Image (cartoon, rainbow, N blue to C red):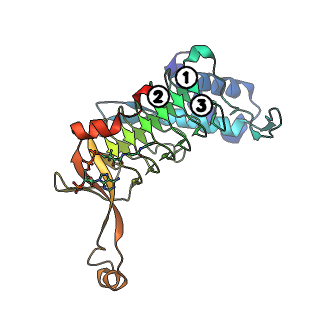
Amino acid sequence: MTIAQLQKAVERAFAAGPASIGDQSAMDVFLELRTALERGEARAASPDPASATGWRVNAWVKQGILLGFRLGSLADISVAGFSFVDKSTYPVRHFALADGVRIVPGGSSTRAGAYVARGVVCMPPMYINTGAWVDEGTMVDSHALVGSCAQVGKHVHLSAAAQIGGVLEPVNASPVVIEDDVLVGGNSGVYEGTIVRQGAVLAAGTILTRGTPVYDLVNGTILRGSGDMPLIIPENAVVVPGSRAVAKDKGHERSQDWGLSLYAPVIVKYRDEKTDLSTTLEDLLR
Ligand SMILES: CC(C)(COP(=O)(O)OP(=O)(O)OC[C@H]1O[C@@H](n2cnc3c(N)ncnc32)[C@H](O)[C@@H]1OP(=O)(O)O)[C@@H](O)C(=O)NCCC(=O)NCCS
């Protein structure tokens, strides 16, 4: 089946609703999609210069992933001494030497339907959910999460405990996108369809959601998601966690009485030689 044929077949099976449960042809379509996802031939969102965000959401892929949850029944997938129960359609992904992915033993798991490119390093414990795309040379450090359908580019460093939110529903919602060469610092979180452009750096502890205004000190602008547009962190921006005063019309006086301020991610600069130095520590480990 070509990808275009697969898309049509997925859309048909998804539209059939609960009637597809027990239908072997729907299951075959799902399994074909799952294989295409793992090979990187289909993905939940793809780069598209013609789109306003630079990314096109492939809603049919997300429909296909949801179809897998609908078609799967709970299965006992216990292994030597550990009991696990999950949807039969989403077992643990198995890797072979030839896949070129390094998985250090200890509490990590990648769900079927995730694409993990050669040269990816997975430090335990970490989790990569279905529909996620993790490109070449990326490091997924301990306690990091790559949520369902999240798109992570090449040579990204997802530092310890970095959380990349997933999004399966609504199907048209844009997944989180982390473009090539981004550093996501330890304990950071990127959620709700946020796009982090190439080369950006999120300092440890930075949290980004659609509703979090980001203050760009360099350009004097305040970035946030609006309408159909997600929050977009510009190329090479260095974002650090800061704080700001409460807005005048939203309880500013009381916040002063109480000594409160709100969390605010701040772009303090754009990547320079010093940033490159601060962010290239782990090359030898890859
Ligand atoms: C952002 C980071 C890469 C530093 O980049 P850099 O280009 O060297 O930044 P600089 O040191 O020039 O700092 C620029 C400004 O941001 C401030 N800043 C830097 N990091 C900050 C942070 N984490 N929180 C708040 N402010 C920060 C600096 O104080 C400086 O402001 P100042 O000039 O007023 O003092 C680094 O702070 C960081 O967070 N690294 C990630 C660490 C990590 O998670 N490692 C993972 C290991 S698993």
The reply to whether discs 2 and 1 touch (Cβ–Cβ < 8 Å) is: no
Q: Earlier in the sequence, mark 3 or mark 1?
A: 3
Element carrying mark 1? loop
Quickly name the residue at label 3: 12
Q: Tell me the distance, in whole angstroms, between the alpha carbons under discs 3 and 1.
A: 34 Å
Q: Nearer the viewer, mark 3 or mark 1?
A: 1
Give left or right: position of 198 versus 99. Answer: left
Dot 2 corresponds to which residue? 285
Image x and y of residue 147, in percent: 54, 42
Left or right: residue 38 versus residue 257 is: right
Q: Tell me if mark 1 has few (under 14), some (14-19) or many (20+) residues whose alpha carbon lies within 10 angstroms of its own.
A: some
- Looking at this view, name the residue that lies furthest to the left: 219
Q: Is residue 16 visible?
A: no
Depth check, front residue: 56 or 280: 280
Q: Amino acid at mark 3?
A: Arg
Residue 19 location in percent, x, y? 72, 38
- Three-letter code, disc 2: Leu
